[in-house]
Image (cartoon, rainbow, N blue to C red):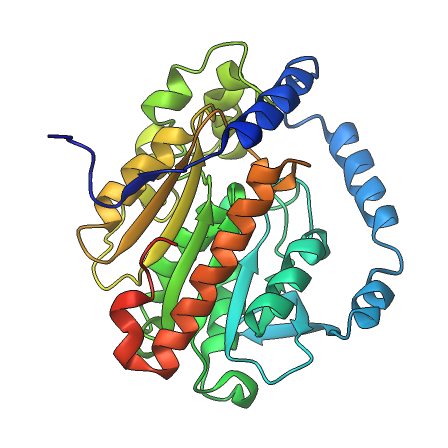
Amino acid sequence: MSDQPAYLTRWPASERELEQLQGFNRKLARLPRLKLFNRWVLRLTQALLRASQLRGDRRLRKQGLRVETRLVSMGEVTVPVRIIRPPTPAKGVVLDIHGGAWVIGNAQMNDKFNSAMASACDVTVVSVDYRLAVSAPIEALIEDCLCAARWLLDDANSEFAGLPVTLVGESAGGHLAVATLLQLKRWPDLFARVKGALLYYGVYDLTGTPSVRAAPPDTLLLDGPGMVEAMRGLTPELTDEQRRAPPMSPLHGDFSGFPPALMFAGELDPLLDDTALLAERWSNHAAVEFQLLPSTPHGVIHFPVALGSAVLAHAHRWIAATNDAFHCPVNALAAHDPV
């Protein structure tokens, strides 16, 4: 009898998918690992990113999507959000929190994923343009994401009233998504409107889970041996005990009342234990589907490989099923069955 938990599924990759992925991994192995906190490199990367996004709105409108950027406020916090609306009436809303190791990126960087999600799932996607940790503490990033979540979920926001809401986060965005959920529990009526969480290979313990601490020098994409010090560098004013406390390290939070979740993590990702431990604790309170991706490093949904495309398609089906279950409760039990 297997000791594998019921929520864990090893992704059924085909031989062709594995061969293609392993070939791409060999290319990644020849590239330098990502190291953080060289401010000039970060500024150059951010500038290049923004240059690549010119005419991004026009590209989305050609796809029949409606796009808008606006400032939203709750209390003393104001944050920009990028809204992508489907051509048909929305069946749900997605709050997207981008990755980028907390130090690079913006709301527009996920246009490719968010436009596909809007079209495939008939959802409006609201992406948060939170402050970056090069100029603000991690707490400020969480405040920005919480501000966007409260604005989206507030009864005064008539556009989204009555629609199911799903939080989506990738990598550092996964960290901010779960931290936002934990903070959102202070507003029970708003928290109850969140019907699902979709998390791609997030960071959930800023002191380093076992797989992070044991990461060898030959990790792909990420600088395994430098990750613990990098996370300390993000929070120089905190002790490890303070870093470990939620919501800074969401892994150690209270998951009671949390919505169902779909989580992905790669077998070769130093952050594997972050998702494995989160899934274990979350599953004590809600339905969790944890897809373990074989031979897969961090960041797979960005790679030109079939497995990455299949992961995104599975995520789209899961979001659509979550929304269908909300509108037709009789289907609730089937909504989160693995496809």
Q: Which of the 4 quarters of the picture holds residue 292?
A: top left
Q: Which of the 4 quarters of the picture holds residue 255?
A: bottom left
Q: Is residue 291 above or below residue 168?
A: above
Using the rendered image of the protein, determine whether residue 157 is visible from the camera's viewpoint.
Answer: yes
Q: Is residue 6 above or below residue 239?
A: below
Q: Residue at x 34, y 44 (%)?
A: 290
Q: Residue at x 41, y 37 (%)?
A: 12
Task: Tally the marks.
Answer: 0
Residue at the limit of the structure toward the top, as seen here: 217
Q: Residue 260 or 104: which is nearer the viewer?
A: 260
Left or right: 87, with 40 as reference point = left
Residue at the limit of the structure toward the left, as seen here: 1
The quadrant of the image that shows the N terminus is: top left
Left or right: 29, with 241 as reference point = right
Q: Is residue 68 above or below residue 32?
A: below
Q: Which of the 4 quarters of the picture holds residue 84?
A: bottom right
Query: Residue 306 location in percent, x, y?
Result: 61, 39
Q: Residue 327 or 271: which is nearer the viewer?
A: 327
Q: Residue at x 70, y 73 (%)?
A: 70
The quadrant of the image that shows the C terminus is: bottom left
Using the rendered image of the protein, determine whether residue 34 is visible from the camera's viewpoint.
Answer: no
Query: Residue 40 location in percent, x, y?
Result: 79, 29
Left or right: 15, with 53 as reference point = left
Query: Residue 85 location in percent, x, y?
Result: 66, 75
Left or right: 91, with 11 as reference point = right
Q: Residue 95 or 335: which is nearer the viewer?
A: 335
Q: Residue at x 23, y 64 (%)?
A: 257
Residue at the limit of the structure toward the front, as seen here: 15
Query: Residue 314 location in percent, x, y?
Result: 48, 53
